[in-house]
Amino acid sequence: MPYTGPVIKTPPPGPNARRLIERDEKILSGSLTRSAPLVGENAEGMYIEDPDGNVFMDFGSGIAVTALGHRHPAVVEAIKKQLDKLIFVNSLDYYSPPQVDYAEQICARTPGNFAKKIFYTNSGSESVDTAIKLAKAHNRRPYGIGYINGFHGRTMGAISFTTTNVVGRRGFAPMYPIGQFTPYPYCFRCMFNREYPSCGMECMNYMTDIIFKKIIPPDEVSFIILEAVQGSGGYIVPPKEFFTELRKICDKHEIILIVDEVQTGFGRTGKMFACEHFDLEPDVITISKAFAHGLPAGAAISKAEIMDWDPGAHEGTLNGGPVIMEAAKAVLKVLDEEKLVENAAVMGEYMKEQLKNLQKKYSCIGDIRGLGLMVGIEFVEPDGKKPAKELRDNLIQAAFERGLLLLGAGPSSIRLAPPLIVGKKEIDTALNIIEDCLKVL
């Protein structure tokens, strides 16, 4: 029977969920963080059911992974069909049609009217590591530049340019030994205490006037890497002018521009890729998450002339398996047939409008921002600016107890990233739950 809304039969986590959590804590790595004590057992569409019969509305989509909703029938069918044909072929040594089919489809959809090539990976972090190696292999320059508050993953290359906090970096030095960092345009919390647009893009000036003139000569910079919209950092959307100027700088100094679309890709922002909102054409784009609807998959896609490394310079045994590729092809087909990218744009605007009405009633809501169905709510203390982390964390737990799954981002924000199939009814239900929580917190 299809789920129609959140249902709490017993206060979560119930006894069956608690038993599984106890087993988990004894055997799985303690490095794993959990936003709420959810034990997922069944799922469909917008909803996840736990072993105690509680049904939760998923407004995080597994950090933007289940973009089509859980267990979309078209993806399930594509996986089943491929299982009857071929599960695995070693992509280092052999070929398979699904790899080529998907490469042609996805390269045609990424920004830029130029020849492209793709390298498949198993995750977003791997895609970032691939992009870093690719840039260095191409131009043989030593330096890389990342952005403060950025998140790119947990593998050694990716974590070297992840600066959301020190937890993931502590104890792992040396990482990428010659990386530098520059401010991202986080206009609600400008590092320079300026306001856009009168700030004159101080965050951009820092790179050109400080990094390039005092720390790194620009002709020795291999790449600049950043997210089109900062995800884990708080769903931060930069001004369009920022990307216009960044593209000019990269072109002037022949620096490879790597744009991380791992969380923002596949329609999440109301366009296929967030770059399109800014008329930006990256040299390399990294993708994962919604790529194959939860199967481990990712890729780095670049201008064809950049992916000129030697045979054997970078490979992966499990990359781009046929089952994953068929799932990924089904994702693209569903996005088109169900017009989910368009729905993300429309429903995202509706959600932000409703949130702004909520903001008028609750002074703890300091900022609402986002593109499409990638919407952030930043909570503040009564002074109107200090991050209200405790309130945010309590809200996530209170919403969970009422059947709504939310994820945190940044110091005091929550990210609303429901499946792209979401409608006004589900949005209204979620926001009513959030308001119910705010009333008692």
Image: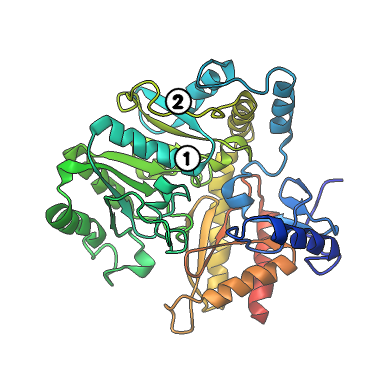
Q: Residues within 10 Å of mark 1 (few under 14, many from 20)?
A: many
Q: How far apart are the two marked residues, 1 and 2, measured between alpha carbons?
A: 22 Å
Q: Residue at x 62, y 56 (%)?
A: 29
- The answer to whether residue 213 shows anywhere in this view is yes
Which residue is the site of mark 1? 126
Image quarter of the C terminus: bottom right
Q: Secondary structure at mark 2?
A: helix
Q: Residue at x 63, y 72 (%)?
A: 395
Mark 2 highlights which residue? 108
Q: Is residue 84 left or right of residue 315?
A: right
Which residue: 36% across, 51% down? 175
Above-or-below relation of 239 to 301: below
The three-letter code of the residue at mark 1 reads Glu
The image position of residue 363, as x and y in percent, is: 51, 79
Question: Which numbered circle lies on residue 56?
Answer: none
Residue 148, position as x, y percentages in the image: 35, 59
What x and y, as percent, mark residue 382? 48, 84
